[in-house]
Image (cartoon, rainbow, N blue to C red):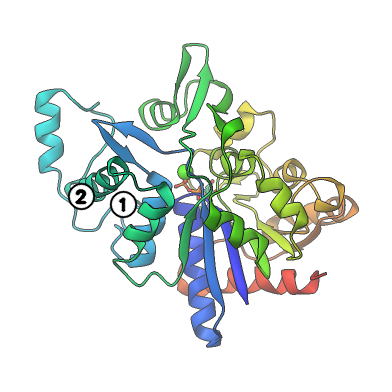
């Protein structure tokens, strides 16, 4: 079975780790493809940085810093201290030495003419990841945030301002000319099941869905499409997704996010939706909209609970397979 996951960074990584663990435990030859958000990517100090991809890469490779929750384990910041002394990087964005190695490799390959997809393949070949990562698009479509103080890159809003500046909207410049990468296209078109990770619906899933062609691939897919809520009991489990949801006028609740994605039967993307047990009241109204909804534990605390969540998502998908 070919399983395709769509998502962003850390929340997606936790989910894919659970899925990989589940696949290993079943001993099946199921494969995992991940279609990754590229809206968070940006240029800093002449380097191309791809936070969501790198979160997935490091977590799947087992070289991530599990205590901090992001970046490489055993990281140091000697180069960053030099860059700060030269005044070439903002002091609010951390660039670890090992992480910089990734950014330099990526930038060198891009400058030599490689596509973003080729860069993913090269970075992914270093470790056995147990999953294949594809950029949603090869185009450069960095997310910008409109605020009363003007428009700024998503990273400046998210990291520098900790998403505290009220956002009026999120845009990806030039996205109307973008197309799905060949890998993303193939992973969605030929999936047996498509799973939406509990990633930020606005800035992680949103830019993927905004790539022209992705929604059509999803609506044409024969695979069941199941999403997992990143909202539990009216709050985000980790991170600041509520600020993004508020900005686009969506309530921070598992039900509202599912309504925002919409039922595939009526032009949306979801056949099925997993909510936490505390959100069981969302199930009936969502079912009435055509989204088969189940309530299960959604906290990914460890390998067992994450693997169980993946198993629940696949069980829901097989129950609604068309
Ligand atoms: P980012 O790109 O690194 O911000 O990560 P993602 O967009 O992939 O995921 C962030 C989202 O993951 C957050 O909005 C959280 O609500 C969600 N999340 C994190 N941990 C968990 C968890 O244990 N369970 C669930 N259901 N969602 C989680
Ligand atoms: Ca992200």
Displayed quadrant of residue 294: bottom right
Looking at the image, is 28 positioned above or below residue 16?
Answer: below
Left or right: 30 as drawn, with respect to 56: right
Q: Which residue is mark 1?
A: 68
Residue 124 lies, in percent from the top left, at 36, 62
Farthest bottom residue? 27
For label 2, count other residues whose C-alpha is less than 10 Å away and answer few (under 14), some (14-19) or many (20+): few
For label 1, count other residues whose C-alpha is less than 10 Å away and answer few (under 14), some (14-19) or many (20+): few
Question: Which residue: 45% across, 30% down?
Answer: 154
Foreground of the two, 109 or 171: 109
Looking at the image, is 159 positioned above or below residue 109?
Answer: above
Question: Which residue: 55% across, 49% down?
Answer: 199
Looking at the image, is 232 positioned above or below residue 297?
Answer: above
Q: Earlier in the sequence, mark 2 or mark 1?
A: 1
Residue 62 lies, in percent from the top left, at 32, 67
Residue 241 lies, in percent from the top left, at 55, 39
Foreground of the two, 37 or 197: 37
Name the element at disc 2.
helix
Question: Which residue: 24% across, 58% down?
Answer: 73
Left or right: 117 as drawn, with respect to 281: left
Assess mark 2: CB under 8 A from ligand 1? Answer: no
Residue 220 lies, in percent from the top left, at 77, 56
Displayed quadrant of residue 244: top right
Q: Which mark identifies residue 171?
A: none
């Amino acid at each position: 079975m070919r399983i395709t996951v769509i998502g962003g960074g850390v929340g997606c990584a936790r989910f894919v780790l659970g899925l990989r663990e589940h696949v290993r435990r079943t001993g099946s030859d199921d494969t995992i493809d991940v279609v990754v958000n590229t809206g968070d990517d940006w240029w800093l100090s002449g380097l191309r940085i791809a936070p969501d991809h790198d979160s997935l890469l490091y977590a799947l490779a087992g070289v991530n810093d599990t205590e901090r929750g992001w970046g490489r384990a055993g990281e140091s910041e000697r180069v960053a201290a030099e860059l700060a002394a030269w005044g070439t990087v903002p002091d609010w964005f951390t660039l670890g030495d090992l992480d910089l190695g990734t950014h330099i490799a990526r930038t060198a390959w891009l400058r030599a003419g490689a596509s973003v997809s080729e860069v993913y393949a090269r970075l992914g070949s270093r470790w056995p990841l147990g999953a294949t990562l594809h950029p949603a698009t090869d185009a450069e479509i960095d997310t910008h945030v409109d605020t009363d103080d003007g428009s700024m890159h998503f990273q400046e809003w998210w990291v520098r301002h900790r998403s505290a500046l009220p956002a009026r909207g999120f845009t990806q410049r030039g996205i109307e000319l973008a197309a799905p990468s060949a890998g993303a296209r193939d992973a969605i078109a030929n999936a047996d099941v498509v799973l939406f990770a509990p990633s930020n619906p606005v800035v992680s899933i949103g830019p993927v869905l905004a790539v022209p062609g992705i929604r059509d691939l999803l609506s044409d897919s024969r695979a069941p499409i199941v999403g997992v809520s990143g909202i539990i009991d009216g709050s985000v489990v980790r991170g600041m997704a509520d600020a993004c949801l508020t900005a686009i006028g969506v309530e921070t609740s598992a039900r509202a996010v599912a309504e925002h994605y919409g039922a595939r039967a009526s032009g949306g993307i979801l056949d099925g939706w997993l909510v936490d047990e505390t959100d069981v009241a969302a199930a009936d109204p969502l079912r009435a909209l055509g989204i088969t909804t189940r309530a299960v534990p959604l906290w990914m605390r460890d390998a067992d609970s994450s693997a169980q969540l993946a198993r629940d998502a696949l069980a829901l998908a097989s129950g609604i397979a068309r």
